[in-house]
């Protein structure tokens, strides 16, 4: 998110029609996806402006190699672009409960502010467990950007039902959650404590 691209995270729980709406409305031309959703790519991209797709499991290394080759050849447009703090860097879409999802544009300044506030409130470091969805600004900012800023390792949750196993295996030092998730963890712990 340095000014040459705009991040548009897509909620994996959206219907194919909802995903298409986000891709068309945002003007997305490139789509990155995990292997779990690769089978939906053709249907998802049909009738959109998406010209290029990248599967994170099989094609990301090729993209990184191509970028490194461009840099080695002297290409600097991306790395030397001046950042306009008021320029849109991401579009997050609402859940669409009252109609089609609506895009909310965030600037570099929005992200920097949220990142600084998050870092002032939470002490990160070591292994961090990311459970918040990345199609929400708080999930991307605090679970990813803040941890990258502090040099933390990030374990990305593959689903709420695996939280206990991942926490045990990954030895997470911290995680950032919203109150609903915190209560979901807190209540069973105290219920078990009270029965013993």
Image: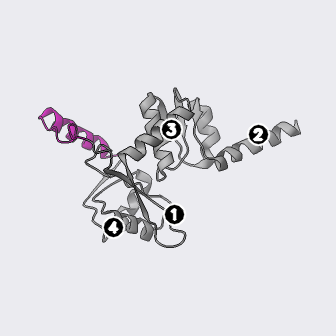
Whether the residues at callouts 1 and 3 have beta carbons within 8 Å, the answer is no
Question: Label 1, on which residue?
Answer: 95
At 36% from the left and 45% from the top, the residue drawn is 108
Which one is in front in this view, the residue at disc 2 or the one at disc 4?
Answer: 4
Nearer to us in this view, 141 or 188:
141
Residue 122 left/right relative to 19: right
Label 2: few (<14), some (14–19) or many (≥20) C-alpha neighbours in 10 Å: few
Whether the residues at callouts 3 and 4 have beta carbons within 8 Å, the answer is no
Which one is in front in this view, the residue at disc 3 or the one at disc 4?
Answer: 3
Label 1: few (<14), some (14–19) or many (≥20) C-alpha neighbours in 10 Å: some
Question: Label 3, on which residue?
Answer: 117
Residue 17 left/right relative to 69: right
Of labels 1 and 3, earlier in sequence is 1
Question: Label 4, on which residue?
Answer: 24
Whether the residues at callouts 2 and 3 have beta carbons within 8 Å, the answer is no
Residue 141 left/right relative to 2: right
Q: Is residue 188 above or below residue 97?
A: above
Question: Label 2, on which residue?
Answer: 189
Image: magenta residue range: 58-82
Nearer to us in this view, 88 or 45:
88
At 48% from the left and 35% from the top, the residue drawn is 154
Of labels 3 and 4, earlier in sequence is 4
Of labels 2 and 3, earlier in sequence is 3
């Amino acid at each position: 998110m340095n000014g040459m691209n705009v991040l548009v995270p897509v909620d994996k729980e959206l219907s194919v029609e909802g995903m298409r709406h986000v891709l068309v409305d945002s003007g997305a031309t490139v789509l990155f996806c995990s292997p779990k959703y690769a089978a939906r790519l053709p249907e998802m991209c049909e009738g959109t402006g998406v010209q290029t797709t990248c599967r994170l499991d099989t094609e990301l290394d090729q993209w990184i190699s191509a970028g490194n080759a461009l840099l080695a050849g002297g290409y600097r447009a991306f790395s030397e672009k001046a950042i306009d703090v008021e320029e849109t860097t991401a579009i997050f879409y609402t859940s669409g409960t009252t109609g089609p999802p609506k895009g909310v544009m965030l600037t570099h300044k929005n992200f920097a502010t949220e990142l600084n506030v998050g870092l002032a409130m939470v002490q990160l470091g070591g292994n961090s467990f990311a459970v918040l969805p990345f199609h929400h600004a708080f999930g991307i900012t605090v679970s990813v950007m803040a941890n990258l800023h502090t040099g933390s390792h990030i374990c990305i949750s593959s689903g709420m039902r695996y939280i206990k196993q991942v926490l045990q295996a990954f030895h997470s030092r911290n995680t950032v959650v919203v109150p609903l998730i915190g209560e979901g963890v807190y209540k069973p712990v105290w219920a078990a404590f009270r029965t013993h």
